[in-house]
Image (cartoon, grey):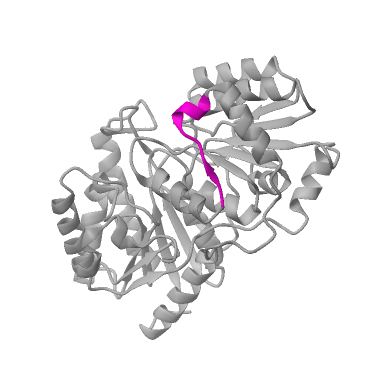
Amino acid sequence: MKIIHYCQHVLGIGHYFRSVEIARALHRHQVVLVTGGPPVDVELPPHVNEYKLPGLRMDPNFTGLFPTDAKRSAPEVQDERRLLLRSLFEKNGQDLFLVELFPFGRKRFGFELLPLLESIRRGDFGSVKVACSLRDILVEKEGQEAYERRVVDLLSRYFDALLIHADPKLVSLEETFESAAEIRIPVVYTGFVTPVPGENAGRELRERLGMSEDEPLVVASVGGGKVGTVLLMAVLEAHSQLVEERRLRLHIFTGPYMAEGDFGSIAQRAASLPGVEVARFTREFLSFLAAADLSISMAGYNTSMNLLAAGVPSLVYPFGQNREQRLRAEKLAAVGSMTVVDDEDLEPSRLAALMKVSLNKPRATVSSPVSLDGAQETARWLEAWGGERGGRV
């Protein structure tokens, strides 16, 4: 099949990495990954071509969009993006349009998606099937009832299938979208999407870091880095207490989008402590988790699934602006996969105590309590579905 996969990240990088993993699993097909957010340092597989739209991102107060290029206006960028998207469809000859999150989110990108979806519906680009790619948990909305009516209407009008990247044994769409029963297109649970570390990835990384087998490694991370500075500062203070008792290595990943001032504060404090390394980003994050004795992080979708894939003991601090991360973290904590950290637990001595307990926990030796085969299952389902509908496989 020829597939156009649309993914617009505006705050973190989880949406982007989940989309990349799904695109990677579609290795038998030609995939164009349409992106339009701040750049992310990732190597794409040969069958995936990235089609970069002029960048848009969310403002610091989460109230609107502005261009990543400060010299350009938002209306100018939006006009160009609309034209570029339409041009892509006119020349590509695609079989499938896979849309990440919309219409459940990214409402502000209706300026480019709705005209395109209407054109697909009219048949302007030939026979193109449209599927929504959706994560496990939706954030709550103002005017929830009207929001759900709008989503159901758009799904009925423009979409042919809904793929939910979750395991219904843990969480189902109905829990955060009460109108799920009104959706009339096929709804498919694929399992959670995550890469899996190589069999020897952790051991090989520890060797490269020059670590002995009995030297504990803690990995602290906050996803894209737009939020989470308070967690990393708390980890540094807790680490300062623990290293008085034992040899301990701490690797911090601040995320590529952390503000320069916050990154500088973390780096300065880290420089005063033994055994601490700070970086914005690593392509080897999963290997670090496989090597670690403890992970401390936010509770976003991608990080949570990476933790399960690596089997590492973990402390997670949910982002508090909406229900998404806390609901996921509490469900995973209930099946024994992680420990939830609250605001009061960020007090250094309290966090140090939690770290000490978690460092004594064994790495998971049994399979994950939920399905982590979401990328492969998505590819399998789309291939079968595309074949049924005459897609070129």
Q: State yes or no: residue 27 in magenta.
A: no
Q: Quadrant of residue 122?
A: bottom left
Percent position (x, y) of residue 231?
Answer: 52, 28
In the rendered structure, the answer to whether residue 347 lies left or right of residue 309 reads left
Q: Is residue 135 above or below residue 67?
A: below
Which quadrant holds the N terminus? bottom left
Question: Is residue 275 shown above or below 34?
Answer: above
Q: Position of residue 121 (x, y in %)?
A: 21, 69
Please identify the quarter of the rendering in which residue 353 is found.
top right
Residue lying at 64% horizontally and 46% vertically, measured from the top left:
313
Give the side of residue 82 with respect to residue 16, left or right. Answer: left
Q: Position of residue 246 (x, y in %)?
A: 78, 27
**Residue 12 sits above or below residue 97 on the image:** above
Q: Nearer the viewer, residue 341 or 267?
A: 341
Q: Is residue 225 visible?
A: yes
Q: Residue at x 46, y 33 (%)?
A: 342
Task: Read off the magenta span.
Answer: 337-346
The reply, left or right, for residue 137 in relation to residue 261 is: left
Q: Residue at x 82, y 41 (%)?
A: 208
Can residue 258 be seen here? The reply is no
Q: Position of residue 366 (x, y in %)?
A: 66, 63
Residue 354 quadrant: top right
Tell me: residue 182, above or below residue 196: below
